[in-house]
């Protein structure tokens, strides 16, 4: 009875609302719904804008990391060359990045990412980034790709170091960053015939890459540039080293054996490689091109596979040096790191960690074997740049086809869903792509270097090479002849050695390290029947018999020449 009474009361209460009051309340509720909808839409827009801002910021930061690799290349190469050529190699690294910025902005970026006319060879618009403005954005994309261009160009500096004219290097750097490299970028990353994203799309807008020209194929997978960047730089350096010829004294004229001209500065070599390793996380992880929408997980996986491959390359190369050379060589271990990094760059997003270990292991073997193959062929690459970047780059492209899985390819956001890796097609695509990159680079860079050699000349004179490019190209003349006083170069080996020190020699001058000078020792006359032989040296070389190892060198610590180990 109580429930019936309560229901009757509520019904009576509801019947007290007029139609106007009901409509007013409904209108109020509609207004609240509209306000909530507007707020949700505004939040969605803000979230989308924040995601875009995060992606842009991520790409700018990664691009800065890649650009910082220029410092790594500079330190590594400065630690490898002789002290008389250090300024020259630093200058080349500096000018590479600057030339790349102007040339890639004016023409290179358009050739790389401009609209394809249907042949899949080269872009045809967006020169001087004319299509990028405040309303469209895209500035960060140019910046990130410029950093890659500078890295590709500076690889060549190590291959032709210590004997190449600056004028010749200027010409090469301009042509590489304007034409040779951007064409390969268009093939692999733009809308070219090898691309996984834009290869000959039909009206449906989907990519139709080789071999099947349908969604059943992926195109060449080169996630961060083992082929596009490193192979182009490495094989260009190889052609430059062949055309310019070996450094004077590098190969014994009688036995043909390679001679170590300098042990280099291991501190600078180590600093350079660690900077490169650090920057490589921007190189590989940044190639996701975004951080939102699940791309962060892919970037994390890339960081892991990159680290494992680099570490494996280091350990393997160090062990190879111990087994075959009898000692642990830090230089070969450092190059092993780079070999592992180059080898994993193409496939870092489509392989699993245990696969990365194998890839780095094989990369180190290729490094060690390639170094000795170059010596057998009498090709002088002071930094082994063509081995690290060219040969290991080929392995990185091939390893992608060997180890990739269809699941990993789809996880890495490649556009087509298929079983190309599982049925072996992907390996064929990778081989074809690598061979085409080699053919293009060898043909174009080789023709360019030959043309330069026949016109302005590739190589400095022998006198300038002996004096050092720091003096001949940059006007620096303050270097002590440490190499000559300590150990004459191979091409002076037939001349008389410097007189050995004896008990009758005057003590060396007091150095800045000595707080208290030792008591003077009176000089005794030499026996009349003994006369030390007088050495002869080229006119542009001066021998200082007063123990130049005590002199303050222009770089390095007290008493330690810049180029000593």
Image: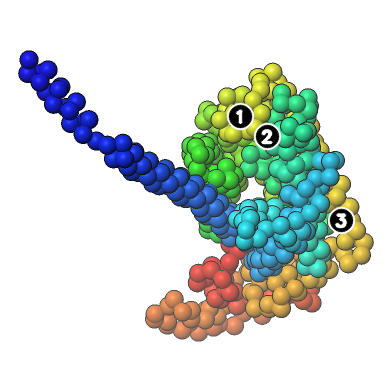
CB within 8 Å, label 1 to label 2: yes
Of all residues, the one furthest to the left in this rendering is 2
> On the image, numbered disc 2 is attached to which residue?
221
Q: Position of residue 445 (x, y in %)?
A: 83, 51
Look at 66% across and 28% down and name the residue there. 416
Q: CA distance from mark 1 to mark 2?
A: 9 Å
Q: Is residue 169 shown left or right of residue 359?
A: right
* Disc nearer the start of the sequence (1/2): 2
Is residue 434 something that shows in the picture?
A: no
Look at 60% across and 63% down and name the residue there. 563
Q: Is residue 36 shown left or right of residue 130?
A: left
Q: Is residue 11 above or below residue 394?
A: above
CB within 8 Å, label 1 to label 3: no
* Disc nearer the start of the sequence (3/2): 2
259 or 418, nearer to the observer = 418
Q: CA distance from mark 3 to mark 2?
A: 29 Å
> In the rendering, which numbered label is found on residue 409?
1
The crowd level at tag 3 (other Cα within 10 Å; few <14, some 14-19, many 20+) is: many
Which quadrant would residue 393 be assigned to in this image? top right
């Amino acid at each position: 009875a109580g429930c019936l009474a309560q229901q009757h009361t509520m019904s009576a209460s509801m019947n007290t609302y007029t139609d106007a009051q009901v409509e007013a309340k409904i209108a109020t509720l509609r207004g609240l719904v509209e306000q909530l909808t507007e707020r949700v839409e505004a939040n969605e827009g803000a979230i989308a804008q924040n995601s875009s801002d995060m992606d842009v910021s991520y790409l700018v930061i990664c691009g800065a990391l890649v650009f910082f690799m220029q410092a790594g290349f500079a330190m590594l190469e400065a630690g490898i060359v002789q002290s008389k050529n250090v300024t020259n190699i630093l200058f080349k690294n500096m000018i590479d990045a600057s030339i790349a910025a102007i040339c890639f902005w004016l023409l290179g970026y358009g050739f790389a990412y401009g609209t394809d006319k249907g042949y899949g060879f080269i872009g045809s618009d967006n020169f001087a980034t004319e299509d990028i403005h405040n309303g469209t954005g895209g500035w960060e994309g140019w910046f990130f790709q410029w950093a890659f261009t500078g890295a590709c160009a500076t690889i060549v500096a190590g291959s032709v170091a210590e004997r190449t004219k600056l004028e010749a290097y200027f010409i090469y750097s301009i042509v590489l960053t304007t034409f040779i490299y951007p064409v390969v970028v268009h093939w692999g990353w733009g809308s070219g015939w090898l691309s996984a994203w834009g290869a000959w799309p039909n009206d449906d807008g989907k990519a139709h890459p080789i071999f099947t020209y349908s969604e059943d194929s992926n195109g060449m997978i080169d996630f961060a540039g083992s082929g596009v960047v490193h192979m182009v730089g490495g094989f260009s350096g190889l052609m430059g080293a062949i055309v310019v010829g070996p450094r004077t004294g590098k190969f014994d004229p009688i036995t043909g054996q390679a001679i170590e001209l300098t042990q280099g500065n291991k501190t600078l070599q180590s600093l350079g490689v660690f900077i490169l390793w650090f920057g490589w996380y921007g190189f590989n992880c940044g190639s996701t091109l975004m951080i939102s929408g699940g791309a962060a997980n892919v970037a994390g996986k890339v960081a892991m596979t990159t680290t494992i491959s680099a570490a494996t390359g280091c350990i393997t190369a160090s062990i190879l040096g111990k087994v075959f050379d009898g000692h642990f060589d830090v230089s070969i271990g450092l190059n092993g790191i780079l070999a592992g990094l180059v080898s994993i760059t193409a496939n870092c997003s489509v392989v699993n960690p245990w696969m990365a270990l194998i890839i780095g292991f094989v990369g180190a073997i290729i490094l060690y074997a390639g170094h000795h193959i170059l010596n057998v062929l009498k090709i002088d690459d002071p930094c082994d740049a063509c081995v690290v970047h060219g040969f290991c780059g080929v392995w990185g492209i091939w390893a992608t086809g060997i180890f990739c899985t269809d699941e990993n390819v789809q996880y890495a956001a490649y556009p087509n869903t298929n079983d190309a890796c599982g049925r072996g097609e992907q390996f064929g695509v990778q081989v074809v792509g690598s061979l085409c990159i080699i053919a293009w680079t060898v043909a174009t860079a080789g023709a360019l270097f030959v043309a330069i050699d026949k016109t302005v000349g590739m190589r400095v004179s022998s006198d300038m090479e002996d004096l050092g490019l720091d003096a001949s190209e940059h006007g620096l003349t303050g270097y002590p002849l440490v190499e000559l006083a300590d150990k004459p170069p191979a091409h002076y080996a037939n001349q008389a050695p410097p007189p050995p020190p004896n008990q009758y020699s005057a003590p060396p001058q007091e150095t800045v390290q000595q707080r208290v000078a030792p008591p003077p020792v009176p000089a005794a006359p030499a026996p009349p029947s003994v006369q030390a032989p007088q050495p002869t040296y080229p006119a542009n070389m001066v021998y200082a018999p007063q123990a130049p190892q005590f002199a303050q060198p222009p770089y390095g610590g007290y008493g330690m020449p810049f180029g000593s180990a």
